[in-house]
Amino acid sequence: MDRDERFRQHARALLNGEGQEAQRIADQFTRDDHGAHFIFIGALFTRIVLRHFGTELHAEELQRFMSGVRQDFQTANPPLNSLHVEGMIRSIYGEDQFLQEVPAGEQSVVMWAVMRKITDQTVLGRHLEQLFGEAEELAERWIAEGAGNV
């Protein structure tokens, strides 16, 4: 199985709540895979957020979503920092300064939590293969442009 397919399988497992399967797949990643995987996650996060919120982020819609995040993750262990969630979403809409406020080690956790919430609660979960393709194209573009640092 090639690297892109491993990334897709890992994402599919995490988005479907199959943590052990996701870990089994992640254990197959090589040292070189980790950077490319993070770029893929960032691109997938971007595509899912843009599909959910549209090309413009409206404050009311974001606040509704954030209210749901606070409710859905109130008992998460470790807790999910809702300010970091909001900052990561807003960074996609040109407010890059918020991304700097989220510790690097927490960015993946936030991205997966948001992607899971959106794909669990909307029809986007039925379009994962299309989203994976879009994410791969976006990741390739970021790498070509030298902007692979999500």
Image (cartoon, grey):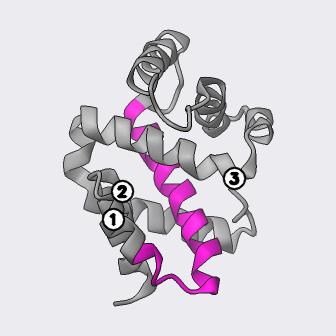
Q: Which secondary structure class fits the magenta region best?
A: helix
x then y, percent, for residue 66: 49, 19
Spatial CA span between label 3 and label 2: 17 Å
x then y, percent, for residue 116: 37, 43
Q: Residues within 10 Å of mark 2 (few under 14, many from 20)?
A: some
- Residue 47: within the magenta? yes
Could you tell me which quadrant the C terminus lies in? bottom right
The residue wearing badge 3 is: 105
x then y, percent, for residue 130: 29, 59
User: What is the three-letter code of the residue carrying label 3?
Assistant: Gly
Q: Secondary structure at mark 2?
A: helix
> Is 74 left, or right, of 145 in this rendering?
left
The residue wearing badge 2 is: 14
Of the image marks 3 and 1, the number of the one nearer the N terminus:
1
Total residue callouts: 3
- Give the numbered dot on residue 20: 1
Q: Confirm or deny contact between disc 1 and disc 2 (CB under 8 A).
A: no
Q: Confirm or deny contact between disc 3 and disc 1 (CB under 8 A).
A: no
Spatial CA span between label 3 and label 1: 20 Å
User: What is the three-letter code of the residue carrying label 2?
Assistant: Leu
Q: Is residue 71 above or below residue 30?
A: above
Q: Confirm or deny contact between disc 3 and disc 2 (CB under 8 A).
A: no
Q: Is residue 136 above or below residue 29?
A: above
Q: Which residues are magenta?
A: 25-52
> Is 6 left, or right, of 83 in this rendering?
left
